[in-house]
Amino acid sequence: MTTRVRDLDESGLLARIFPLLPAGGATIIGPGDDAAVVAAPDGRYVVSTDVLVEDRHFRRRWSTGYDVGVRAAAQNLADVAAMGGRPTALVVALVVPGDTEVAWVEGLSRGLADACAVTGAAVVGGDLSGGEMLMVSVAVHGDLGGRAPVLRSGARPGDVVAHAGVLGHSAAGLALLEAGVARPDDGAGSGAPDAAPSGAGEPIARFVAGFLRPAPPLEAGPAAAVAGATAMLDVSDGLLRDAGRIALASGVVLDIEAAALAGDRRALASAAAALGDDGAPLRWALSGGEDHGLLATFPPAAALPAGFRRIGSVRATDGAPGVTLDGATPPVGPGWDHFRA
Amino acid sequence: MTTRVRDLDESGLLARIFPLLPAGGATIIGPGDDAAVVAAPDGRYVVSTDVLVEDRHFRRRWSTGYDVGVRAAAQNLADVAAMGGRPTALVVALVVPGDTEVAWVEGLSRGLADACAVTGAAVVGGDLSGGEMLMVSVAVHGDLGGRAPVLRSGARPGDVVAHAGVLGHSAAGLALLEAGVARPDDGAGSGAPDAAPSGAGEPIARFVAGFLRPAPPLEAGPAAAVAGATAMLDVSDGLLRDAGRIALASGVVLDIEAAALAGDRRALASAAAALGDDGAPLRWALSGGEDHGLLATFPPAAALPAGFRRIGSVRATDGAPGVTLDGATPPVGPGWDHFRA
């Protein structure tokens, strides 16, 4: 018989979850008390929060509990990396309808654990509640290792614009699923997407996996800080929109070079062909969100750290800050908004 | 014309919220980047999370946005106090339907700010999402000031059991609202409930206010740590149930003295009379949740810090850990569960 959340009391559900959660090296007091205690050897900690809501950020018919756990952790971990930090600890608030299978919640826990494992971060606490829809709210913490945090506001004219991770894969995966051209199972065994695009089109399973279980280049964040990055953020709402955030905060123009995206467009060609949409690769690369790559600016003399590739440059502006593609207004609009559409 | 959340984009809504949020002394980098940076002078930080879900933890016909903000902050701040810490920073994930009035969200922000103001804690970050129901998820952080955290597991035979804050006020307020004997507006001007019960029955407005806007005795937490408290937690699910958690974690029996609750019962008599329920005061005092007072154990020789009063003692057990009332099984059952009922 299928065990559902309402068949257990809170302590019974916690007893299923706790053994699945990762313990981390920074944990002093873990789950089970009023609060956890986490080491902050740097004398500061980085903190951010991101929430995933059913039917807004994921659909249960596409995403397993495991997928949602990976994604909830990954997008939070990317925020710490984007400050130049290393993740240490997560707390997780979970709202779950009573008819949800306990196996779904166990899968979520395993997904959180697997996404954290590569970083050594722990899940140190949480809260459980019933509710009419699934909701996973994560707060993530990290350590800066004595370095200054890398903000959005430090880009300077002459800097190199560089990106680590994939562009447009998540958007392509979503489009493939929405069109019914791919099924969620297609992405099951394909693991993490490649950090850099390659060849004349990735297997479309890669895009489905990239949408369901994004794999941000977390190590590239601290590496960028060490290399002297002047500004950085994680690309959650699309390259143009997030580049615009650096431009606005820094009072500069970021000029993206279309030629630098040629490899991304080639990688995405297989997905575009499957959908019969020739214009999709450029659109996905420029506007697709949720890949959680890192966009950073570096002084011109800096050696780009592993994982980063140059995609443009920073220039001064007499007018409004903004983003250009080869010096002109980009041909596609920026990202999307949470409260409309 | 009423402005609703769907009338603004995310940055427009954030522009309404940011000016209302408190800045704190520990904030190094506040809202607006991928993550905040907060000082941890102690080299450790305390962290916990609690979520409030519409129609589970609050009802919009009873609670204003301001009320929900106060409550979301208060129950989280109490978790830091219960470790013996001082709150420094909150991050807030808010899920809000598009038809919600922007004024409700502004009220929530003011409530968070007012509840934080007494502690000097800041709201340093957040996330906004649309969704079918309102949900407020807070993660709270605090500083231990060089002291050891006060866990649930340190109670020893011979210790004094003590409580700071009110008992049963929130449960009484809920009962008055459910019965239609009081209206939410009745609690509007009455401020925070008294820290200690008094007289032969509080004005019933106090209970309504105590339910809508709990005011935990936050200063009593660090004071208890300084005074040598051996165990502590915040009473969120009722005195008996939460005392049972200390008992279980410490492997002891907590014996509560009924005479010590006489003042609480007298204070609650007015609410019981209004409902014609003579047995309610003892039931509310023993089993009512959500007051977020602090329950602690102290060595017998310790001077109880301001705000705490003795309500019982700790004894060893050969059998199961647990809670007794005057040495016998309590006459009412413990708390409640989130996934049933």
Image: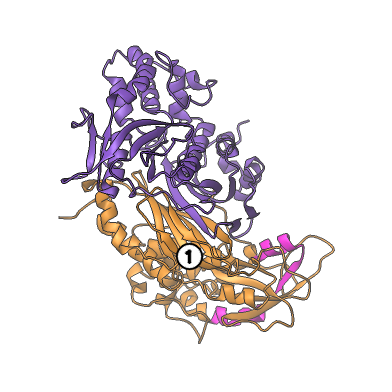
Chain colours: A orange, B purple
Estimate the x, y position of residue B115 in percent, counting from the top left. Answer: 55, 36
Residue B109 vs residue B6, the one in the foreground = B109
Report the quarter where the N terminus of chain B lies: top right
The reply to whether residue B211 is visible in this rendering is yes
- The residue at 65%/78% (across/down) is A227
| Circle 1 residue | A88
The furthest residue to the bottom: A199
Left or right: residue A276 compared with residue B113: left
Q: What is the chain letter for disc 1?
A: A
Left or right: residue B276 compared with residue B134: left
Estimate the x, y position of residue A161 in percent, counting from the top left. Answer: 68, 75
Report the quarter where the C terminus of chain B lies: top left
Left or right: residue B259 compared with residue A332: left
Please say if A220 is above or below B268. Answer: below
The stretch drawn in magenta includes residue A255: yes
Estimate the x, y position of residue B316 in percent, counting from the top left. Answer: 23, 44
Residue A143 vs residue A315, the one in the foreground = A143
Estimate the x, y position of residue A145 in percent, counting from the top left. Answer: 58, 70
- The residue at 34%/60% (across/down) is A108
Which SS does the magenta portion mostly show? helix
Q: Report the amino acid beneath label 1.
A: Thr
The range drawn in magenta is A243-266
- The residue at 15%/45% (across/down) is B319
The stretch drawn in magenta includes residue A324: no
